[in-house]
Image (cartoon, rainbow, N blue to C red):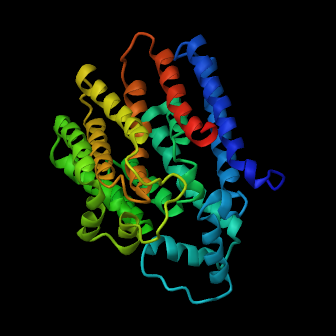
Amino acid sequence: MFDWIPASSYTAIHYHLLLIIALLITFHALIFEIDDEQSITFFYTLGYLVVIVLIFYMGLRPISGAYFGDTETYDKVYQLMQAGATVKIEKDYAFNYFMKFCSRIIDVHTFFVVLDILYILPCFLFSRKYFGRYWFFAMFMFLCSFSFWSYGTNGLRNGLATSFFIMGLYFYDKKYWMYFWFVLGYFMHASLVIPVAAFIISGLYKNPKIYIYIWLLSIPISLVGGSSLGGIISLLGFEDRTSGYLTNKAGVADEVGYIGFRWDFIVYSASAVFMGAYFIFKKKITDPFYIHVFGIYCIANAFWILVITAAFSNRFAYLSWFLMPVIFAYPMFRYKIWKEQYKIFGGILFIYFMFTYFMNVLK
C-alpha cells in the first residue's frame, strides 16, 4: 500500500502529517469554542480516519533495520518460524508464542499490522471511555508523544506491554479484567513490572506529595550514584532481557538510548510532574483515578532517572512516558479549569508535540 514511499522518508512523512494535524487542532482551539458542534464533528470524523490510516501506515512500513530498528530482527525470526525452524522461547511468552502462532497463518507484513492494531487500539478505547466526544484530542496526545512511533516500529514488545497497561486502566473499575491485562502485558515484556509495581505502591499510599518527593529525590541520588545503580538494580530479579538493558550487555545504545545524564529528558519528564502537581494542588483535582495515575508516573519515572546513565535507559523512560498524555489531557477534558480552556489546551498540545517534532525531525 505504501511501497512507493522510500524507507528513508517514511518516518519524516509521519511526523510532518502529525504537524499538520497539530496545527489544525491549535487553530480550531483559537477560533472555536470547545462545545462547537461543527468543530467536534470534524475532529470526531478525522479521528477515525487518522487511527485507521496510522495502523496500516505503521504496520506496512518497509522491513528495514536502518530506519526501523528491531523491525528487521523481528522479520528474521518470523521467517525462521515460517520455515519451521526451532526457535527456543524462554521469555516474553505471550509475545513469542503469539508470534509463532501468527507465523503459521499470515505473512510478516500482516503480522506487523496486527501488532499495531493491538498497540493503538487500547489508546483509542481508553480515549473514548474517559474523554467521550473529545476523545480525539486525548488520542492525538498519545499519537504525538515523543516515543509513540518508535515503540510501534522498533521496541515492539515494550510498546505492546505499555498499551496493555493502558488497556488495564480502561478496566480500572473492573479489577479482574484490569489485572488480566497487566499480567498479559508483563508476559509481552517483563519490564512492565515497573509500572505495575508503581500502580500497587501508589494505590497503597495515596498522598500525591509523596510521589513528588520520590521523583525529586531520584535526581540527586542518580547524580551521585547513577553509574553504579544500573548494576545494583539489575540484581533485583528482572529477567535477562530487562537486566541486560541496565548493565549494557548488548554493548550499544539504540536510537534514543544515549548514555549519560540527559537533562533534556529530565525537563521533558518534569513537565508531566509539574502539570500533575498543578492540577492536583493548585486546581484541587481530587479525582482518585487521576491521583493514582500521577503516582504511577512519578514512581516509574523516578526509577528511570535512577538508571538514566545506563545504555538503553530510554526503554525504562518509556515505562512512564507512555502515561504523559493521561497526565496532561485528563483534567482538561474532565473538569472546568480555565476560562479559555480550549485555547490553553491547544497551546499545551502544540508545545507538547513540538518537542516530539524537534527531537525526531529537526534535531
**In the image: residue 24, left or right of residue 169:** right
Name, please, the residue furthest toward the right: 4
Residue 222: x and y in percent read 26, 49
Tell me which residue sits at (65%, 59%) in the image.
113
Residue depicted at 36% across the width and 64% down the height: 246
Which quarter of the picture shows residue 143? top right
Q: Say whether residue 318 is visible.
A: yes
Up the image or down, 212 lies above or below 193; here it is above
- Residue 258 vertical placement versus 187 (above, below): above
Is residue 10 positioned above or below 140 on the image? below
Residue in view at x 51 percent, y 27 percent:
351
**Count of numbered labels shown in the rendering:** 0
Q: Quadrant of the C terminus?
A: top right
Q: How far from the left and from the top, in percent, is residue 107?
A: 71, 71
- Please report the residue visible at 40 percent of the width from the left and 51 percent of the height from the top: 260
In-front residue for pair 361/102:
361
Residue 218: x %, y % from top left: 24, 46
- Reply above or below: 50 against 28: below
Residue 283 is left or right of residue 165, and the answer is: left
**Snapshot quadrant of residue 327:** top left
Quick one: 142 or 212, which is closer to the camera?
212
Question: Which of these two is toward me, 251 or 153?
Answer: 251
| Quarter that holds the N terminus | bottom right
Q: Is residue 207 left or right of residue 59?
A: left
Image location (x, y in percent) of residue 136: 55, 33
Left or right for 121, reference 171: right
Kindly tell me whether residue 41 is visible in this rendering: no
